[in-house]
Amino acid sequence: MLRTKRRYRIEDHALLSNTRSATLVLPDGTINWACLPDFGSPSIFTSLLGTPEQGYWRVGPAVPDGPPPDADRRQYLGDTLVLRQEYDTPTGTLAVTDLMPAPDAIGAPAPRIVRIAECVRGVVQAVSVYRPRADYGATAPVIQRATSSSPWLEAVAGPDTYWLHSDHAPDHSVNRDRVCRSNFTLTAGESAAFTLTWGPTVRGGSAPTRPDAFTELAETVRHWEEWAAGCTYRGPHREALVRSALTLAAMCHPGGGIVAAPTTSLPEAIGGERQWDYRFVWLRDSALTIASLLRLGKVEEARRWMRWLITTVDPAHLQPIYRLDGGTDLTERVLDHLTGYEGSRPVRIGNAAAGQLQLDVFGEIADTLLLAEDVGLPPEPWTDVLLLSLARQVERRWRESDEGIWEIRGPARHFTHSKVMCWVAVDRILRLLERRPDPDTALLHRLTELREQIHADVCTRGIDAERGVFTQYYGGRALDASLLLIPLVGFLPPDDKRVIATIEAVQGDLTEDGLVLRYATGRHAAANVDGLAGHEGAFLACSFWLVEALAVIGREDEARELFDRLLALRSELGLLAEEYDPRARRQLGNYPQAFSHWAMADAALRLQGQPDTTETVPAVLATASSPEGQRQLAGQVAR
């Protein structure tokens, strides 16, 4: 059994990805989470969410007893997703290089993990311990050698077969617990390579083509270095932004869908119930990821996402979350055989939030489509069809209550942010349609009235008149971090008194140790609006929103100070989870999280002077948001 010296923190993990699936690697050389061939596939290594019995694979120094050592040095090779960890032993230094081969020329990544052990100095005793457990650690596969003389070890679990190849190392022996082990000795300059390849189970099928680990290493380094070189940001935080961009790219599937994170059920509070499966495509998260990549000069991911969008989404039957293949069945279930990360149960797969109404997604989609055209991507033939369909749905549904951006599992409400993003949807659709030759003037007039009506409604019903601040939902008094977006999306100008008061209220009442909470929970609230027990950590994306909000209202020194503090919360490899616990000083939630990384990139760009969304407020709304303008518009009905 693998003996670890402690429970590793979430931020101790490194990420490998081929953009189709992902792997997490610990400092001691253990892979404790891997899903093959896709992000949403059942994991083959699941000790992250359970015990070593649920599957792992360690390559590192051999130790006769006790826990394996942590790497003395670990880093990504330049601007890549290739990990190198070095271990100093009494007799020499061992380097282990891990990767998932990058997409080839036609964008088809091999569903494979490559691990190369190399002796850098002296002589080292090394080991590969391989314990595959299929179906989230529930099934021990049948393990056998492909042939008596073959370097391939075949592990069959129902429809999935995992092929382990050893090169310049002794074959793995298999014990009665179906744990595979290869001990080997390397001297300076020598190396051994291991590759794990997924394939569908085929009766009488043969092993894959023998991989060339070193060629795949070179090609993968070249692929990611070339990709990163295309990032246009040249500001003071380039290294951090390129790492975030690479992390976002790691979650952009070749089919166009973008997962929110490559993991499930990493807790938002240790020991609590807030564990969710993020290995799906949130329309909101994917649109915001694409927007961030576009601002960094990356367009190919946007093209793929837009193609995925038009082939997947029917605005008349919109759901906020989809499977990577566009499927809509995300039935949520609990894996009772897993104890959870640090005992945090339940472990969930699937996500019931797919059945919710989240009105804000109309706005994020339309906003990103506008940005795509602004940076030079021409509209597709289907773009206007999608825009008109989105407009019809906003017109029909914006008055409804919903579960909002935070997909609460309590009662639906009229969330202020949802209404603001409905306004954004209409505003961006209008601006796109106005560019078209021979626009439908009657339609433009109707949408203009609808935009003004939504704006007046928010400014009347979404505000606490006594305090002069916007509220989480109509009729309430609570705050919500999503209100920080009001000036950032151009709903109101930054110098509006209500905007400034809301930013200051969030900063004063909705922070812990200076970091922003999404909304009050647990010890911060009498009752949780989300319908869940307990509390959660500070939401990192919201803290970056505060950076942007402070910057646009002129408090740039304060914004930069907070931004620098947030950068310091990243892992040693530059990665961010969803949340941060200021008391325990640790990251929480699924990891790495796209939401956190695009928010960080956007905040850095804001501090450099872009993106400037303050000009998006139409002049007519300067009067529409006045008390007199609100009275005139509140009764209008868009038809």
Image (cartoon, grey):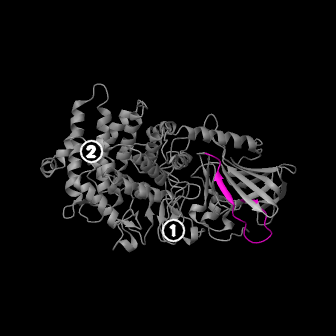
110 on left or right of 629: right
Q: CA distance from mark 2 to mark 1?
A: 45 Å
What residue sits right under mark 1 in the picture?
585
534 on left or right of 204: left
Q: In the rendered structure, find residue 395 and report the number of the disc placed on it.
A: 2
The residue segment tinted magenta is 58-78
Closer to the camera, 71 or 292? 71
Please state the horizontal and vertical placement of residue 116, each as a whole percent of the image.
Answer: 75, 50
- Which-is-in-front pick, marks 2 and 1? 1
Would you say residue 467 is visible in this rendering? yes
53 on left or right of 551: right
Mark 2 residue element: helix
Mark 1 residue element: loop
**Label 2 Cα neighbours within 10 Å, binned few <14 / some 14-19 / many ≥20:** many
Q: Amino acid at mark 2?
A: Glu
Please state the horizontal and vertical placement of residue 401, each as a whole percent of the image.
Answer: 29, 57
Please state the horizontal and vertical placement of residue 156, each as a whole percent of the image.
Answer: 72, 54
Please state the horizontal and vertical placement of residue 621, each as a whole percent of the image.
Answer: 21, 44
Query: Is residue 531 rendered magenta in the image?
Result: no
Indicate the quadrant where residue 176 lies.
bottom right
Q: Which residue is farthest front?
A: 557
The N terminus sits in image quarter: bottom right
Q: Earlier in the sequence, mark 2 or mark 1?
A: 2
Indicate the quadrant where residue 91 lies.
bottom right
Closer to the camera, 559 or 296? 559
Closer to the camera, 267 or 328? 267
| Image marks 2 and 1: residues in contact by CB distance under 8 Å | no
Residue drawn at point x = 63 percent, y = 62 percent:
46
Q: Amino acid at mark 1?
A: Arg
